[in-house]
Amino acid sequence: MTRLSLILCASAVATLGLSGCVPKKQAYRQPTLPVAPSVWQDDLSAEEHAQASPATAPAAADLKWQDVYTDENLQKVITLALNNNRDLRVALLNVEKTAAQYRLQRAQQFPTVNGVASGSAQRLPRNVSGLNKSYVSESDSIGAQVSSWELDLFHRLRSLSQQQFELYLASDEGRRDTQVALISSVATSYLTLAADQQSLALAQQTLASQQATYDLIRQSSEHGIGSNLDVSEALSQVEAARADIARYQHQVSADNNALAVLVGAPVDPALLPKSMGDGTSIKDVSAGIPSETLLRRPDIREAEHSLKSAYANLDAARADYFPKIALTANGGVLSNSLANLFKGGPGTWLFNPQVSLPIFDAGTRAANYKLAEVARDTYVAQYEKAIQTAFQEVSDALNGRVRLLEEENAQTANVRALAETYHLTEARYKAGIDNYQAVLVAQRSLYSGQVTLISLHLARLSNQVTLYKALGGGAL
């Protein structure tokens, strides 16, 4: 029987090979990068590029997030998020699920051996036994059994196992990508809270100053010095500051809620920042060159493992064109009495190979193979899209690093000038040279400039967070 099975199998393979109906095997090939392999596309000069991506700075993918976010309180908040965030927990469970699926698929390459034992007894009446007396027939057996084990001669099961293994690796990279996104989101949320806290403190300081000014002008007006217009304008400044305080208090509350959701647990108020000076030290990283940097991002590696799984699935679909050989076998001892079961001589065995030859299936195999090809091409497009998206994210972040720094420096100088203007205008008003309207305009300009400076400082730091994430930092 075994010899016959092998002959049938060899004949089927030869026939299929001569007929040319078996698709050609397609080995995995990494797609060509759909972006420039050596430069980032942006409008920076060579000098600005060096400023945006210092050559002496380490690569983001080589840095642990603790080395980039150096503030201890921020590190504690990020650690809390890594331990409690529900999205990351789901990603970890997905890794465990795909690992179990891989073990299940891999187990199909090996035979399943079951220990079996059975016994039976049957009484035959006298008129049936042929012995002119009733008769009890007994049978006992014990042994091992292999049920329908497929010989993986054409690597169908091995390809399916490889497919599940690549999906497992993809899920692990997906978990790493979720971690990178989580760390970035926590850092950005933390910085946003710090900026809004600082804006709230600025509004409170402004209210105190405006209230003092209003009280002074009102008292002066009551003594016949100044006008009711000055009193009204000073009062409008006080109320405007109150409105800003209420707005920033609302934003701070919303920031706290958003951070708590990311962390997945209540955050100790002692760990929260009070201003942009708290927890805002972020280490510089080097962008490197695209061909080396992009391929280290976990989302791109996830896309590549998914593509490799599609190639493995294609191999499995190709193997369906070949015969399937399944073996059923058992061996053990059989006796008509339990006392003689383990004595010499009662051994028994069964060997039953089966060959399934694909002859006509109304195009099912061809359709399955075409489906696998389309899935492979889809993953190629997704891989290329992931590369392009990553390239854009890094280019935008590099460009933003230099431009935001220039803008922040300019706004810092502008605030200094506005502060000087305000002090001079206030002095002129107290000397009776100018009216209060000039002081009012200077106050508004200074306050607006200070708020803008806080926003720019937040934008620059958030850009550093984005660049570190875009370069795949935080996966370690």
Image (cartoon, grey):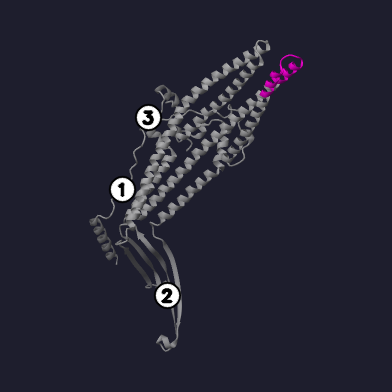
Magenta highlight: main SS: helix
Instruction: Kindly identify which residue carries mark 2.
Output: 340
Instruction: Kindly identify which residue carries mark 1.
Output: 26
Look at the image and give the residue range highlighted in magenta: 213-237
Query: Where 444 falls versus 115 (above or below)?
Result: above
Residue 217 magenta-highlighted: yes
Query: For the residue labelled by badge 1, is the local secondary structure a helix, a strand or a loop?
Result: loop
Residue 277 magenta-highlighted: no
Q: Amino acid at mark 1?
A: Gln
Callout 2: few (<14), some (14-19), or many (20+) C-alpha neighbours within 10 Å? some
Residue drawn at x 27%, y 55% as measured from the top left: 21
Q: Amino acid at mark 2?
A: Asn
Callout 3: few (<14), some (14-19), or many (20+) C-alpha neighbours within 10 Å? few
Kindly report the distance in space between the C-alpha atoms of the residues bearing marks 1 and 3. 32 Å
Query: Where 46 falls versus 151 (above or below)?
Result: above
Query: Where 111 falls versus 466 (above or below)?
Result: below
**Mark in the foreground, 1 or 2:** 1
Q: Position of residue 346 (x, y in %)?
A: 38, 73
Kindly report the distance in space between the C-alpha atoms of the residues bearing marks 3 and 2. 83 Å
The mark that comes first in sequence, 3 or 2, is: 3
Give the total number of marks visible in the rendering.
3
Q: Position of residue 245 (x, y in %)?
A: 65, 29
Instruction: Kindly identify which residue carries mark 3.
Output: 39
Query: Where 280 falls versus 109 (above or below)?
Result: above
Residue drawn at x 40%, y 57% as measured from the top left: 108
Comparing 110 with 26, the one in front is 26
The mark that comes first in sequence, 1 or 2, is: 1
Query: Does residue 355 appear to the left or right of 56 in the view shown?
Result: left
